[in-house]
Image (cartoon, grey):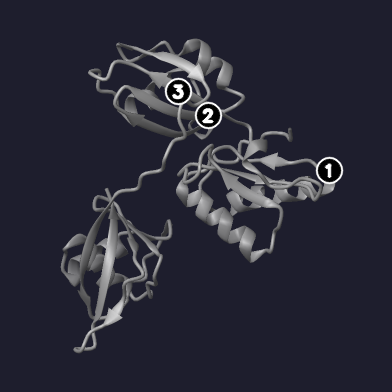
């Protein structure tokens, strides 16, 4: 197993990308696989774009199950096939009484109380009476030995998964017509605010496109772009874009719920 790298504690800027490149260089020079810590969605997007731009091969993202939101980046030497089985990820199944309503925040809080860093924790999938948890293998012994209660609720924890988790993304479709595919027009549809108010939001630095803050209200938005507005949520521009007879654009925004 290659050395585990704590990349994941930073944001998505130059330092983050420089450390990604350092990891690639070490993998190439020493012929050993290298892994980041768990990255959030913005970091996965930034790293993916950087690797694609620089034509880096032999790498993949994995979070312990298909469709994971928080994922590690693995960079592999030529003799290894990039695969999820090589990643230093531990999976746990935590069970408890279904009448005890526990949330993602409850589980994360218990892990943070153990002084476990956020980048050492992957997805936490909570359902009635059961939780699937992913961490780095480095903190796995601590999690297994110390997690006996979540808050005041007694739980049973075992390493491994009793069932394959399924990533369930739920969306609320917001449809309407906009004058153009400018950012301010699309954000206006997402938030229900006027163009004037929308421009204030954009200039205020609380609007992101593909996880990067954008203060350019005239930026062109395309299919597949992720628009995030603090306080209003996140939405993806669906493929359903067409021009109307009045030369406007009919679009559908898939808002994450």
Give SS at disc 1. Answer: helix
In the picture as drawn, the residue positioned furthest to the right comes out as 30
Q: Residues within 10 Å of mark 1 (few under 14, many from 20)?
A: few
Above or below — where is 118 with respect to 158?
below
Q: Closer to the camera, 70 or 24?
A: 70
N-terminal of the pair, mark 3 or mark 2, is 3
Residue 135: image tag: 2
Above or below — where is 201 with respect to 39?
below
Q: Which quadrant holds residue 239?
A: bottom left
Quarter of the image that includes the N terminus: top right
What residue lies at 47% left-to-right and 34% top-to-bottom?
Answer: 164
Q: CA distance from mark 3 to mark 1?
A: 36 Å
Lateral position of residue 190 relative to residue 210, left or right = left
All told, the count of numbered labels is 3
Residue 48: image location, x then y, percent: 57, 56
Q: Are marks 2 and 1 in contact (CB under 8 Å)?
A: no
Look at mark 3 in the image and give the residue it sits on: 93
Residue 53: image location, x then y, percent: 63, 65
Look at mark 1 in the image and give the residue it sits on: 30
From the image, state whether disc 2 or disc 1 is nearer to you.
2
N-terminal of the pair, mark 3 or mark 1, is 1
From the image, state whether disc 3 or disc 2 is nearer to you.
3
Q: CA distance from mark 2 to mark 1?
A: 26 Å
N-terminal of the pair, mark 2 or mark 1, is 1
From the image, state whether disc 3 or disc 1 is nearer to you.
3
Above or below — where is 80 with respect to 104?
below
């Amino acid at each position: 197993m290659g050395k585990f790298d704590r990349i994941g504690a930073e944001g998505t800027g130059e330092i983050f990308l420089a450390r990604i490149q350092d990891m690639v260089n070490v993998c190439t020079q020493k012929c050993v696989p290298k892994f980041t810590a768990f990255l959030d969605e913005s970091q996965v997007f930034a790293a993916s774009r950087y690797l694609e731009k620089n034509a880096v091969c032999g790498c993949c993202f994995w979070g312990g199950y298909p469709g994971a939101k928080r994922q590690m980046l693995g960079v592999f030497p030529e003799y290894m096939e990039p695969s999820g089985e090589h990643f230093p990820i531990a999976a746990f199944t935590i069970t408890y009484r279904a009448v005890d309503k526990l949330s993602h925040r409850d589980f994360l809080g218990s892990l943070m109380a153990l002084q476990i860093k956020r980048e050492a924790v992957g997805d936490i999938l909570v359902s009635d009476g059961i939780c699937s948890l992913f961490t780095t293998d480095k903190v796995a012994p601590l999690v297994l030995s110390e997690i006996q209660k979540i808050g005041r609720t007694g739980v049973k924890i075992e390493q491994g998964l009793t069932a394959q988790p399924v990533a369930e993304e739920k969306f609320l479709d917001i449809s309407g017509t906009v004058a153009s595919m400018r950012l301010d027009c699309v954000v206006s549809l997402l938030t229900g605010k006027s163009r004037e108010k929308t421009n204030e939001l954009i200039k205020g630095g609380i609007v992101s496109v593909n996880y990067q803050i954008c203060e350019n209200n005239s930026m062109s938005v395309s299919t597949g772009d992720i628009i995030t507005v603090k306080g209003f949520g996140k939405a993806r521009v669906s493929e359903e874009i067409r021009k109307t007879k009045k030369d406007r654009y009919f679009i559908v925004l898939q808002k994450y719920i």
